Image (cartoon, grey):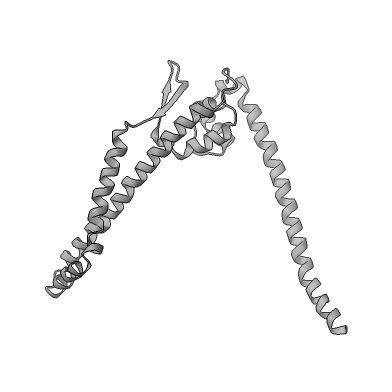
């Protein structure tokens, strides 16, 4: 029994500091979350104030970045999405494919509509490029024995440049193939975003400052 009590004492001595650290961490996290929510509420309120329109473009852009916590967002983009319910969700998804989206504007520069920037032929060419470059890149794996033979032959002849070239071409092709495939994927994401946005986004306010 005495041994058991000693063991329990050691266990308690080890667990109590861990429990206290966990509780303190939770309390700090809750405090930070509460303060963050209050700060975001204040930012949202300030964003709706008329006076913000009198500020410089730089100020308004930085304010928009702080409001949604997205470094690439501009004030006009934020103002556009704030016309819709659940703007945070749409802005978060928009930021992922922003470079592939074209922003149509009115005569004073306000964003009126979002469309996919590139024609559908671009992803088709991207997919064809992927097939071409991937085919070149996988040649050494398909013809492994011949590829190794060329490397050994070039090495025996003392021509390291040949080894470098026949190694670089497949690697570069694989990289370009991956780049083409990523473009096709991003184009698909941007297309789906536009379709989903205009299908599901609910416009709640047409008079956002």
Residue at 74% of width from left, 65% of height from top? Answer: 18
86 sits left or right of 4 in the view: left
Q: Residue 162 appears at what percent x and percent y?
A: 16, 64
Q: Residue 8 appears at what percent x and percent y?
A: 82, 76
19 sits left or right of 106 in the view: right
Residue at 39% of width from left, 38% of height from top? Answer: 188
Q: Give the quarter of the image for residue 149.
A: bottom left
Residue sitting farthest toward the right: 1
Quadrant (top left/top right/bottom left/bottom right) for the C terminus: top right
Q: Is residue 7 among the parts visible in the rendering?
A: yes
**In the displayed structure, would residue 39 be above or below residue 47?**
below
Q: Give the quarter of the image for residue 39.
A: top right
Quadrant (top left/top right/bottom left/bottom right) for the N terminus: bottom right
**In the displayed structure, would residue 10 be above or below residue 104?**
below
Residue sitting farthest toward the left: 157
Q: Which is more toward the observer, 47 or 183?
A: 183
Q: Residue 104 appears at what percent x and percent y?
A: 41, 23
Residue sitting farthest toward the top: 107
């Amino acid at each position: 029994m005495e041994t058991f009590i000693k063991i329990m004492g050691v266990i308690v001595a080890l667990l109590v500091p861990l429990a206290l650290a966990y509780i303190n961490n939770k309390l700090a996290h809750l405090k930070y979350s509460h303060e963050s929510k209050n700060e975001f509420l204040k930012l949202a309120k300030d964003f709706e104030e008329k006076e913000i329109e009198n500020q410089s473009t730089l100020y308004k852009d930085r304010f928009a970045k702080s409001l949604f916590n997205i470094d690439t967002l501009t004030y006009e983009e934020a103002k556009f999405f704030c016309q819709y319910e659940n703007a945070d969700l749409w802005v978060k998804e928009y930021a992922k494919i922003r470079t592939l989206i074209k922003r149509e504007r009115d005569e004073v520069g306000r964003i009126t509509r979002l469309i996919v920037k590139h024609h559908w032929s671009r992803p088709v060419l991207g997919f064809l490029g992927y097939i071409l470059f991937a085919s070149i890149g996988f040649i050494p794996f398909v013809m492994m024995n011949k590829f190794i033979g060329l490397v050994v032959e070039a090495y025996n002849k003392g021509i390291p440049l040949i080894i470098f070239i026949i190694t670089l071409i497949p690697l570069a092709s694989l990289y370009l193939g991956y780049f083409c495939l990523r473009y096709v994927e991003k184009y698909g994401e941007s297309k789906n975003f536009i379709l989903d946005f205009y299908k599901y986004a609910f416009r709640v306010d047409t008079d956002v400052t």
